[in-house]
Structure formats: C-alpha cells, structure tokens
Image (cartoon, coloured by chain):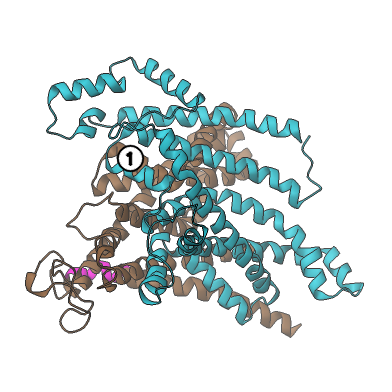
Amino acid sequence: MTRRFGGRRLRAFVRNRTALVGLVLTLVVACLAVLAPYLSPHNPLEQNVYNMLAPPGGTHLLGTDDLGRDVLARILTGARVSLTVGVCSVLIGAVLGSVAGLVAGYFGGRVELLLMRVVDLLMSFPALVMGLMFMAILGPGMDKLILAIGLVLAPQVARIVHGSVVAIRQTEYVTAARAAGAAPGRIIVRHVLPNVLGEILVMSTLWTATAIRVEANLSFIGLGVSPPTPTWGNMIREGVRWLVVTPWLSVFPGLAILVTVLGFNMMGDGLRDALDPKLH
Amino acid sequence: MGSYVLRRILVAIPALLAAYTLVFLFVRVAPGDPAVAALGDYASAEAVRALRERMGLNDPLIVQYGRGLLGYLGGDLGRSLITGIPIGTQVASVLPHTLQLTFAGLLVGILLGIPTGVLTAVKRNRLPDYLGRTFALAGLSVPAFYLGILLILAFSVRLRWFPVMGSGEFSDPWANLRHLVLPALTLGIIMTAFVTRMTRSALLNVLREEYVRSARAKGLRERTVIYLHALRNALIPVVAVVGSQAAVLIGDSVMTEIVFTRPGLGRLMVQAMNQRDYIALQSMIVLYAGLVVVINLVTDLLYGVVDPRIRYD
C-alpha cells in the first residue's frame, strides 16, 4: 500500500517537474526577450568590417557574423521576434478556431457539417505548405507572418474545441440553461466557453511551440520577417554559408530555437498530463 | 476490401477537388500580377501582356479553373512560368528522391521508435524511461533543418563520412546510399520521437488489460507477453498517429531537402515560391494535399493489417 502511494507521489512529482522545467525555460527566454535592449552590450544591427566572423569569446561572447554583427545581441533580438510571432499568432488562431469550434459544436447540424468539412480540408495541407501558401498571398512582413501562422493553427484549434463542445452540449446544465430560455450566444459564452477555456489554455502552450517552429522554418526558407531584423531562422540561413569555417553562426541560434520550443512543449505536456491523468 | 478501397477513393475525390479549388482561389487573390511577379518589376508592358496571354490569365476565371482541372485529370500540371519546362516532367524527375527519403525516414523511425517505446513502457519511471522520454521531447522540438545542420557538422564536416549535399545518381547505388544516410537520419530521428511516444502510451494502456494478466498468469515469458500479446494490440493507435502525423512529417521532409540541397518536391515548391512562379506553386501545393489524402487512405488500410478484427465491408 505504502509502495503504491510512494509510486503515485513520484509520478506526480515527475509530471510536475516536466512542467516546471518547461516553465522555467520559457520564463528565462521571455525575460531575455523583454530585457534584450538592456542586456546586450552591442547593437544587433551594427556592422563592423574590421571584426567579421570573430570566434566566440572576448567582447563578443558568441562571436560575430560575416558583417561583424554581434551574434549574442542578434539572438536576443531574435527572441523578441520569435516570442511575439508565437504568442500573437496563437492568439489569432485560438480566437478564430475557438469561434468556429464553438459554433460548430454547439449548433450542430448543417453548420457543424460545413465548418468541420472546411477544417478537414485545411488540415489536409501540411502546416508548412499552408504557411508558405498564406505567405505567398499576404506578402512579407511580421504582421503578415503572424496572420499566416494564426490561420495555420486555427483549424487545429477548431477541431479540439469542437470535440470538447460536443461533449458539453449534452450536459444537464446546458439543457437547463436552454430550458430557462437563455439565448444561444449567452449559453456559449457563459456556460460552454468557461468549460473549454482550460483546455484551450493548456493546448496554447503546445500551439506556441508549433508556431515558433513554423516561424523558424519559414524564415530559414527566406519568408517572413525580412533582414536586417534578426530572427533565429534567418540567422541560421545566413550562417549556413559559413558552416565549415564558423559553425557557431548556425549552432547558437538553433540552440535558442530548440530550448524555446522544448520549454513550451514540456510545459504543455506536463499541464496536459496533469489535466488528464488517464493519458499516463 | 476491394469495394472499401473504391469507396475511400471516391470519398477522396471531393476532398482533392476542394483542395484544388481553394488553392486556385488563393493564388488568384494574391496581390499583384503573377506575370509581373514572374518577369520582375522592370519588365516591359508588351512582355507582361504576352506572358499573361500565354498563361491564359486573360481568360475568365471559370475557364482558367476548368482548364487547370482538366489538365490535372490528364496528368498535366502546367508549365513553369520561368523556364517553360512542364511541371509534370520536373515532378517526375525528383519524385523518386522524395519517396526514397520519406520511406527511409519512416523505416528508421519504426525500427528505432518501436523498440525504444517498448523499453520506456516496460521500464516505466526508471532511468531508461526518463532518457527515452527526454529524447522524444527533444526530437519533437528540434526543427528538421537544425537537426540536419548538426548532423552535417558532425558527420560531414568533422568526420568526413558522408557528403554534404545532393542525392547521388540512382545508377550509382553506393553514392546514392551515402547521400541518403544523413537526410534519412534527420527525418528518422524526428519520426522516432513520434513513434516512441505513441508506442509507450499505447503499450501502457494495453498492459493494464485482463488478457495480459492471463498471459502472465499462465506462465508465458515476459518477452512473449510484451511482444506477442501486448505490442500487437498497441500497434493500432501507433499506426493511426503516425498516419495522422504525415502532414507534419511532410513539412519536415521539405526542410530536410532544403538543408541537404537534395532534389525533391519540397525544393521544387520552395523554388517556385522564391521565383514567384504561381502556376508551379499552385500545382505543388495541390500535389502535397493529394499526398496527405493518399497517406490517410493507406493508413486506414493498414489498420486491417495490424488488426485482423477490422474488416472492410
């Protein structure tokens, strides 16, 4: 008996630890992004032809790139771009997807059929391919990039919210609200939404991880935020040309992507397991 | 079985048609003139007019829509705006490389992922489990292009075991294989992460079942119980998830091709994007949507192979 109890405690601890490590990683990256202008000793855009491709160490802690720009300063600025794009696009995707999922799930019938068919259709495009398509239509720029990634995420959000709403619409309190004569809009906002909000919030951490990855992929291809504004993806894109001579130009920004995405994934995983212990 | 396949294919047709319609409309609402985009801002008005005529952009939308559709049905993907080469020819020449990479990645993922998943489930909450789960999380978080760069740095730049770029000719199997190793490993490691996680959670669910207890109770060896009784049933959700992750993996294969400058569908698509070749881009996107539809179909059929209880009628 005691052994089982100990095992369960251990498991709970492990679960929390994953979420905790994720939270710490995410917070560290967020702090670095917010404080970037005060932390970096150099201007991320300042070129210096006399100090190109300097190795890590000295005044340039992570070295300089082929234009003599400080890699550390650029990575810190890149964190602002990645987090901004990640958080804003998830907001857009979550709002669009939730509205579609709530409406489809609550009303059912033709509306549900139509909306979910559109969701299925959009999900038959790989996320990267869809991001590419939206960028082709919208053109370059950070605002367009945020919208494009938000649109990529929206169908995924809609599918999950729809699933939860279908379960909730049959519950007694929804029936009771309907019997009491509440308008559909009121029932959705007051009774259904609060019950799916927790899941949306937990999944948002995982969607942020996806958004940051898609952003990195697109800027590595050369779409998205245009140079000279540094993003982790376009830093690697520029650094790859010097891979043999100065590998740190690609390795450090990539490490930043990995740590950030890992942080969000760990936090999301831990939270999801905590919400639904059956999964483990 | 035959009629089931036929029915599934019939269901896939409207999905593909809808995908084509969507992409067609999207490409048409893109700001700017595709002819200007293809020729550059400094092209003369006559050149733009001539290209518009040649592209059929002056025809009514419905005519363009129908022509594109008829073309696809006849296997004609249109011509590149830039080079004039039929897109179908380009696709046919790179498709084997993409398929080779995808299958190799899948194979690596299954061969490494299922044993790792079994190990983590059996040694649950012990060291191998932690290591396996950490590895899986890292594999799900690393962008394919970055993993590719790290492998290039380690095995091409430092150890000089494998070539950095290209794919090698199929006529030279040894060179072809040497070119395949690192890209396949890139995709394979990410696949392994997916498969490990799915195998672990599916097996943990199955191990709670009564028949597993019965198998143990009648004195079967643990290995027999795990591999013959439990794993067999755990594989169904694994197949389902691997299939549903196809779209993600296709995105990763695009990035892998770009990092290793391997010829393939992904590079063709990105090239079309960079050259603002909207006709080629439209065809490539439709092709990728078709690929996802086909993979979903194959996944559904695979259920029957892993689980004989599932019948198609």
- On the question of residue B1 being in view, the answer is yes
Q: Position of residue A250 (x, y in %)?
A: 30, 68
Which hue belongs to chain A? brown
Quick check: B48 left or right of A9? left
- On the question of residue A99 being in view, the answer is no
- Between B287 and A132, which is closer to the camera in this rendering? B287
Tell me the kind of residue under disc 1. Answer: Ala
Q: Kindly identify the residue that appears in the image at 76 percent across and 36 percent down.
A: B1
The extreme right residue here reads B218
Q: Tell me if residue B104 comes above or below residue A113 in the rendering.
A: below
Magenta segment, which residues? A30-37
Q: Main secondary structure of the magenta part?
A: helix
Q: Tell me if residue A121 comes above or below residue A257 in the rendering.
A: above
Which chain's residue wears label 1?
B
Q: Quadrant of residue A13?
A: bottom right
Q: Kindly identify the residue that appears in the image at 36 percent across and 40 percent down.
A: A133
Residue at disc 1, secondary structure? helix
Q: Label 1 belongs to which residue?
A: B272
Q: Quadrant of the C terminus of chain A?
A: bottom right
Which hue belongs to chain B? cyan
Q: Position of residue A110 (x, y in %)?
A: 57, 26
- Between B157 and B195, which is closer to the camera in this rendering? B157
